[in-house]
Amino acid sequence: MNALIKPFNKIRIKDIPEVGGKNASLGEMFNELSEDGVKIPDGFATTSTAFWNFLKENNIEIALKDLLKELERKNYSNLHEIGSKAREIIMSGSFSDSFSKEILKAYHNLGGENKIDVAVRSSATAEDLPQASFAGQHDSYLNVSGDAQILKAIKSCFASLYTDRAIKYREDQGFEHEKVALSVGIQKMVRADKGCSGIGFTLDPESGFPDVVHITGVWGLGENIVQGAVNPDEFYVFKSTLKLGKQAIIQKILGSKEQTLIYAESQGHSSTVNVSTEYKKQNQFVLSESEILRLAKWAVIIEEHYKKPMDIEWAKDGISNEIYITQARPETVHHKDQKIFKKYRLLEKSEVLVRGSAIGSKIISGTARILESPREADKLKQGDILITEVTSPDWDPVLKKIGGVITNRGGRTSHAAIVARELGVPAVVGTTFATLKIKDGDQITISCAEGSKGLVYKGLLKFEVSEVDFTSIKMPKTEVKLIMSDPEKAFMLSFYPNNGVGLLRMEFMITHKIKIHPMALAQFDKVSDEDVRNLIEDVIQGYKNPKEFFIGELSQGIGTIAAAFYPKEVILRMSDFKSNEYANLVGGIQFEPIEENPMLGFRGAARYYHDMYKPGFKLECDTVKNLRNNMGFTNIKVMIPFCRSLEEAKNVVSLMAENGLVQGENGLEIYMMVEIPSNVILLKEFAEIFDGFSIGSNDLTQLTLGIDRDSDVISSHFNENDPAPKKMIEMAIKRARKAGKPIGLCGQAPSDFPDYANFLVSAGINSISFNPDAVMTGIININKAEGQKIKT
């Protein structure tokens, strides 16, 4: 005789047909992963046998089958009516005495002498479809206590097999309703209402990049994340250095978390209510760094156990301060071996109506439809862009028609974001004001192709879609590297064919992430402008001091790119601002000289050991030291720009050592940009100081020809194909190779001109770095060049 109840310690993943995917996974982890430190709250499950017995004992089977025959299957116009009647039929049934006794016996055993609070969760299953996913289709009840409430909650879960959304889901999937059963999991309650909770993915949910754990969290119960009711905290943890015991958190993004979902005790145990989060907690991360790392380690253990990417729910008990895994299911949207990409690019811009988190990387134009609830589904035409406050599983039948979705609230793991990924449509979530700033019927364009920020533009804008296919790409012998500056695109770009990053510009990140002059942070006490001081104090909240802010924020930006391409080398160029560019940063005017010709002035290596910038350069070195030593990114190499003389080179290398970056220590290599004629002329001597070189063809061309490429009058004379700069490049390559040092080139010419690629390959270049949009053309040109070189 099949059991009606199974305790978690008797459940394994093979029991999916009996207890559904959710309960089978909980039992599997409870039994197999507890020894690894993964904490799963204990519990038990009702079985599919119990569900079938319930239907038979109450003569419900035939009634449900006959009722479902009446479902109008073209437009599902009577879906709500059919669902409501089906749930009434189930709720009118009664549990047998034997089933009720078994439930209560298991419940009492779980709590000992106390009538403990439990979570009661639905776990659907299909005997002949054990891999079917029914995530989010059925109901769960939290903080349930007492015999009568337990029995009522279990029956309500049974009834939720026929929610409107669950019926429509099975119809869409082609599942026969009468073959799907409902198991119920009863689990010790984690008091996240007094703590926090969230979701974790064992990959990046946008790009599918597999080597990170992405964690989101809110104060209180996690339903606020699923429903997108608040913007959560986000954390990215890099798996490879996590396994090495390093400080592997590469991003920490503070969410607003304006609401906290707690229990409404006066309204019954399973009722919940949102309350305003106190200001202090809104500006505080829900997890400490040690807790983030612990959760990430558990996520990796779970992923390795199941041998597939996982979607995990976690909760922290605010009373015991213990963290638990409350659910784990396979992540089904992404695939690791991504070789074909569709690339979207806007061809025009207009007024930006709202901004939020970008879900996906597509662009779509269409008609805005503002809906307050799924009941207004008749207003939505196929391909319309849905705009609403927030979505929940009740919206699922409606969402099949949308071309895109915009919500006021929610983060990357909200219901709207998850469904948008599954449907392959772009979404912009957490915009705050979309329903106010966009009117029903407006023509709008959603762009998720501009990094992690999603933008909603006014009007139907033109855009292009191109397909990038890496399936049959043959990598040349000459290394192909990327020129990078934007961490938001790093995970996606890591899938491009490459040998690492040949140029990572630090100054871009200072401009976009820090936005404050390094000296204003290094010597905050000397900032004379009170408004600037107030602004800096406001920006650095969450950090101990201005210096920690610089190191922390810059480490996140650089670390994300270093992680994306790990263990391939990432050549990080130290800041190469000119004085006029530095002056534009917050507080910059006070610390910068006024120069007639900044291009040839106070820039590059000369700044680093000068008293006017020396403390700022120390911050840069401290950041690199943190990345390499603490975070484990030993794939980062450092490059010095605009180094005019051998004396300057020695000064900088010596100063770096004073700042803790000792050449050769922990494998540190220091490169130099070749962009001044003196670099070429004395390259043999520079090779005795540096470990490698990268040719900056733009500056080298400019300084060889004596042309200001920014001059409107003579910029047309700027020509990388001119024999003089090409001769300089050829000399540099040959001298570096003779000295046994690697040398590469960063520039557009090798992708624009096949002959230029041939010239570099023939000269013996080790690597060529391209902007991402030029990689494909660059590889083709190098392959052709290498073929010609072999023939000659």
Image: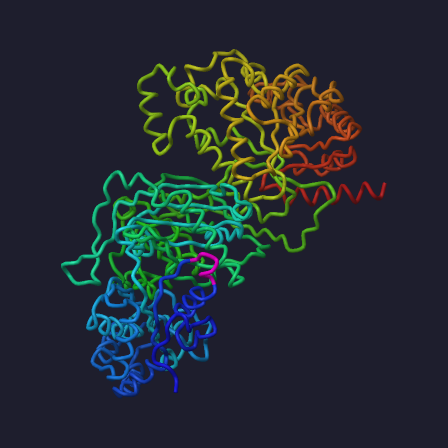
196 or 782, which lies in front? Answer: 196
The quarter of the picture where the C terminus appears is top right
Q: Is residue 62 above or below residue 253?
A: below
Q: Position of residue 566 (x, y in %)?
A: 59, 44
The quarter of the picture where the N terminus appears is bottom left
Q: Where, by quadrant of the figure, is residue 602 drawn? A: top right
**Left of 690 or right of it: where is 390?**
left
Report the residue that reaches farthest toward the left. Answer: 266
Q: Position of residue 126 (x, y in %)?
A: 41, 77
**Residue at image point 50% right, 39% down:** 487
**Residue at image point 47% right, 33% down:** 554
Report the residue that reaches farthest toward the front. Answer: 113
Q: Position of residue 72 (x, y in %)?
A: 31, 77
**Left of 471 or right of it: where is 236?**
left
**Residue range (magenta):** 33-38
- Is residue 37 rendered magenta in the image? yes
**Left of 83 or right of it: where is 335?**
right
